[in-house]
Amino acid sequence: MTEKVSAEIPVSADSRPRHVAIIMDGNNRWAKERRLNGVAGHKAGVDAVKAAVETCAREGVEVLTLFAFSSENWRRPKDEVTALMKLFLFALEREVRKLHRNDIRLRIIGDRSAFNKPLQDHMAKAEELTRNNTGMTLVIAANYGGHWDITQATRKVAEMAKSGELEPSDITDNLIQQHLSLGSFPVPDLMIRTAGEQRISNFMLWHLAYAELYFSPVYWPDFKEDEMRKALQAYAGRQRRFGQTDDQIAAKSSLSEE
């Protein structure tokens, strides 16, 4: 998917989200309640990732973005971070060919410079293997933060202005969006966060401007197919007004039915 996406706020949307973004929260608490270490929770969360990918692909979702590791997660205990990196590498080695067989394209966003070279190499190989797939796109946000994303996009635009490629008056929402990590993808229609927390935690700050938010009390390892379908059904039942009134939306609906 390489379409040129406008940053303009839309006026309507389908009942099925094109792009779903998920903050996968609760792995540690899931493990703690079972008297397991935190790494066991993250390993259990891998099965929930598979369920989310399979369900969204079946439901016709075009893009699924998963917040795997934030720029703030480096603050966690060193042993946990090390284990997470090993788990990430293992998942890339084991799962990418399954994605490829199912025509799913993998894209990884975030600042890769902090990762070791073997992990960076596997990221690049996984993306290259699935580059030409035409099914759903799975985006993994790793060492990603919304502040970082907007900053790196702004820096690119500033360099263009410095080199004389554009004037300050040429800087628009669309120009900035084109330089964000997912500038060529539709913005998320639905953002899901598990484990009862109700905040977006520096995740896709630009992109979530008009996303529908769904907060589930279920810990991520238990967020399987049924829970995913509940979130999609909840989204389908919402009225997205994009700044318009209920009467305006009703009038448009009546016209479309005629």
Image: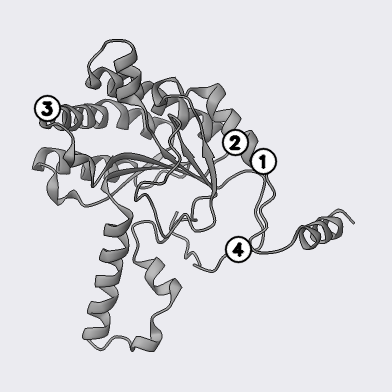
Out of 146 and 152, give the one closest to the viewer: 146
For the residues labelled 3 and 1, the Cα–Cα distance comes to: 41 Å
Label 1 is placed on what type of residue? Ala
Left or right: residue 140 compared with residue 90: right
Residue carrying label 3: 79
Label 1–label 2 contact, CB within 8 A: yes
* Residue of label 1: 236
Residue at 44 percent of width and 57 percent of height:
207
Q: Give the Cα separation between the discs numbered 4 and 2.
A: 20 Å
Cα gap from disc 4 to disc 3, whole angstroms: 44 Å
* Residue type beneath disc 4: Pro
Residue extending furthest toward the right: 258
Q: CA distance from mark 2 to mark 3?
A: 36 Å
Element assignment for label 4: loop
Residue linked to disc 2: 232
Disc 2 marks which amino acid?
Answer: Leu
